[in-house]
Image: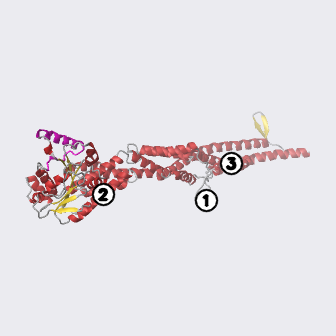
Amino acid sequence: MRELLSRSTKEPAPLAERIEALEHATTLLEGVAPSGAIEESRDLLDRIDTRRALSAEHTVIGLFGATGSGKSSLVNALVGAEITQATVRRPTTSSPVAAVLGERGSDALLDWLEVEERHHLEGTDTALAEAARRPPRGRRARREATQGGPGTPGIVLLDLPDLDSVESAHRTVAERMTGLVDVIVWVTDPQKYADAVIHQEFVRPFAGHDAVTVLVLNQIDRIREDERDPVLDSLAALARADGLDRAPVLATSASTGTGVEELREHLVQIARSREAIASRHRADVRGAAESLQEAADPTGMAEQPAPADVDALVEDLATAARIEPVARAVGASYRFRSAGKVGWPPLRWARRFRPDPLSRLGIGQGRDAEGLQRTSLPEPDAAARARASGGVRRFADTASEGGSDPWRAAVRDAARCEEEQLPDALDQAVAGAELRATTTSWWWPVLDVLQWLALLTWVVGLGWLALNALLAFLGMPPPPMPMVQELWIPIPLPTVLVVLGIAAGLLIGLAGGVIAALVGGWHRRRARRVLTARVRAVADDHVVTPVSAELALARDAARDLALAHG
C-alpha cells in the first residue's frame, strides 16, 4: 500500500487503472459502506463507461447558474449568434440547447445527453466557429493543440436550465447535467455570486475539478470599474473555499462583450487539447474514491488478527467448551482404570458400581447414526455462554481497532456470522478428540502379578491357620507350626504370611495409586493440549478466518481507493 501511495505522488496511475481500481473498491465496499455511497459510485462508473464509448472528439461544455445570471445571453455571445432565447422572463431556458461544432459523432453523444434542440455551427461564420478554426495563440497553446490532434476541435456548448428554477423538472435536468458534461462553467452575477446555497449544493461537490471548471462573473458591466477587482477577488476566494484551487475566474458581460472573447478562447483551448474528458473522469474518480473513503474508511486496521488476541479468543471458547472438566475426567479415567488393574484385589469388585468418568461424559463412545460424535456434557451455563459470546465480540473489536465504524461493524458481523454453530462445533471438537480413553500402561500387568502373589501369600497363610484351627476343633493333632523369631516374640509362619500378604497388597495398591496419579496428571495435561488445539481449529474456522478475510478486504479496498485517488 505504501508503494501505491508513493506512486500516486510521483507517477499518477493511468486513468484506466484508476477506474478499474474504483470499480473493484466499490465491489469490496458493498455491504460495508452505506448503500447510497455505493450506488453513487456505480452510477459514476456507468456514466464514465458510457461517455468513453461515445465521441472523444467532442468536448461537452455546460453553462450552469442561477436564475437571472444571464447564461442564455452569454451562450449567444460566445457562439456569436442567437441560438437560445434570452429574455427577462424567468425561467427562460426550460430544456438544454446545444451549439455543436463537428457534426460527425455528435448525434449519439447528444442523444445520451438527452439534448433535442441542436444548432450545428460547422461551416458557419459564427464567432465560436471562427475561434475554433483559428490557429492557437502562444507556444503552450500550440503545443497542446498539436498533442490534441489536427483539425478543428469538436465542441458541444450547452445552455442549461437554472439550478434554482421554480420548476422542479428544470432543476432536475440541470443537476443531472452536472454529472454528464466534460467542462463545467459556473455563471453567476454580482447579486448572487456569494449565494451560499449555490456554493454548498452545487459548486462545492465538484471540489478538485479545477482542470474542467471555469467560474464566470457575468454582467460585470453592472459594477463600477473600481469595484470589479474586489468582487472578482471575493469570488475567487469563495472558489478556493469550495475546493477549486486552480479554477480560473473570469469576468464577462454578454451585453457589452467585455471578457467574452477571453472566455471563448479559453473554452476553445480546452476543447482543442482534448484532455477535458480524461480530466473530468480523473476528477470524478478521485472524488468518488474520497466519498467512499469518507463513508467507510478501510485504513487504520491491522492486516491480520494479533496472535495474542487469537489466544484470548481460544481461552474464552475453551471455557465454553468445558475443556478443563473434560481434561480432569481424562486423568480421573486413567486412575479409575489403573485401580481396576493394580488395586487391592478384594476391593476391585466395588469399582463395578462406579462408571468411568469419561464414559459418564459420553466421550469416546463412537459415532451415532448420523455420523456425529455426541457427548453428555451439560449445556454451558449462562456464564460460559456469555464468556464465549463476549470473547468473540472482544476479538472482533480488538482486530478492527483503528478502523472506521462501518468496517468495525463488518468485522463484528463476520466474527458472529457463525456464532450459532459454535456450540455444536465445540461439542464435536471435544467428542472427536483422541484422548486415549482406552490406553493402558506397561506397569499395570507387573503390579497386577505382584498383587495376585500378595493375595496368594496371605490366602495360603490364612488357609494354614484355618486348617490348624479345624484340626484342633476335631481333636486331631495339628502338624508342627513353624515359627518365625521376630525380636523376642516368636510368630507362627502362617500368621506372618497373612500379615505380609495383606501389607504387601496394600502397599502395592498405594504405590499403584501414586503412579496412577502422576501418569493421570500427564494424561490430563495432554488432553488439555489436544482439546485446546481442537478448539483453536474451531475458532480459526468459525471466527478467525472470517475476520481475517474481512481485514483482507479492508486492506484491498484501501489499496484500490489509494490507486483510484491517484
Identify which amino acid the numbered label 1 is placed on.
Asp
Q: Seen in the image, is 388 located left or right of residue 24?
A: right
Q: Residue at 62% across / 56% down in the picture?
A: 365
Tag 3, which secondary structure? helix
Numbered circle sitting on residue 368: 1
Mark 1 secondary-structure assignment: loop
Give the residue type that dot 3 points to: Leu
- Nearer the observer: mark 3 or 1; the answer is 1
Question: Disc 3 marks which residue?
Answer: 450
Q: Is residue 528 left or right of residue 186?
A: right
Picture coordinates of residue 307, whole percent (x, y): 43, 45
Amino acid type, callout 2:
Leu
Upstream in sequence: badge 2 or badge 1: 2
Image: magenta residue range: 225-254
Q: CA distance from mark 3 to mark 2?
A: 87 Å
Instruction: State whether residue 121 is above or below residue 397.
Output: below
